[in-house]
């Protein structure tokens, strides 16, 4: 069962009764141009999908580079911290060598005082 519908320019088209009203309205408004529009939309859709894949690829590349840079920075920081710790330890060792032990100095003065008094 088909229903006859008039088009804008007096064209007659058979539309199945089971077709939705929206499809019938689209057919009345766009007619033969509908295939061209569908083709253009499909082209746009494919273009958008390819751009999306390209952007995702670039994002993955940037993410990889960022992670690598963070890892390099972390390594550099660890090296510098280790160098600073070593430098600090060396300087504290040097200070400890140059520092006068008060207890030992007191014992030496006591011994010196006892020797002088004898």
Image: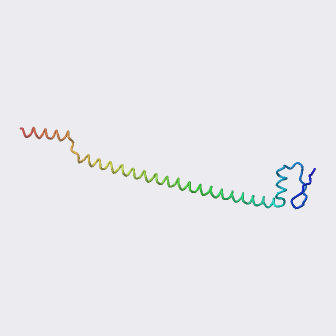
Residue 61 on image: x %, y %: 58, 57
Q: In this view, does 103 lie above or below 81?
A: above
Q: How many marks?
A: 0
Left or right: residue 105 versus residue 24 is left
As drawn, which residue projects farthest toward the right? Answer: 1
Task: Give the residue drawn at x 59%, y 55%.
Answer: 59
Say whether residue 74 is left or right of residue 64: left
Q: Position of residue 47 (x, y in %)?
A: 70, 60
Identified at 64% across, 58% down, the residue is: 54
At 84% from the left and 49% from the top, the residue drawn is: 21
Name the foreground residue: 63 vs 31. 31
Q: Which residue is drawn at 88% across and 48% down?
A: 18
Image location of residue 110, percent across then percent down: 13, 38
Screen quadrant of the C terminus: top left
User: Hey, which quadrant is residue 116 in on the image?
Assistant: top left
Q: Where is residue 25 in the image (x, y as percent from the top left)?
A: 83, 53
> How is the structure coloured here?
rainbow
Vertical placement of residue 96 versus 58, above or below = above
30 is higher (above) or lower (below) than 19: below
Q: Is residue 13 left or right of residue 81?
A: right
Specify the farthest residue to the left: 118
Of residues 97 and 30, the one nearer the viewer is: 30
């Amino acid at each position: 069962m088909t229903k006859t519908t008039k088009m804008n320019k007096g064209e007659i088209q058979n539309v199945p009764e089971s077709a939705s009203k929206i499809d019938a309205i689209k057919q009345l408004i766009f007619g033969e141009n509908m295939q061209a529009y569908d083709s253009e939309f499909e082209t746009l859709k494919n273009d958008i999908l390819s751009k999306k894949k390209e952007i995702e690829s670039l994002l993955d590349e940037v993410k990889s580079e960022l992670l690598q840079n963070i890892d390099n920075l972390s390594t550099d920081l660890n090296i510098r911290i280790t160098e600073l710790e070593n430098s600090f330890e060396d300087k504290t060792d040097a200070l400890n060598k140059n520092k006068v032990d008060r207890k030992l100095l007191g014992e030496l003065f006591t011994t010196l005082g006892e020797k002088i008094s004898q």
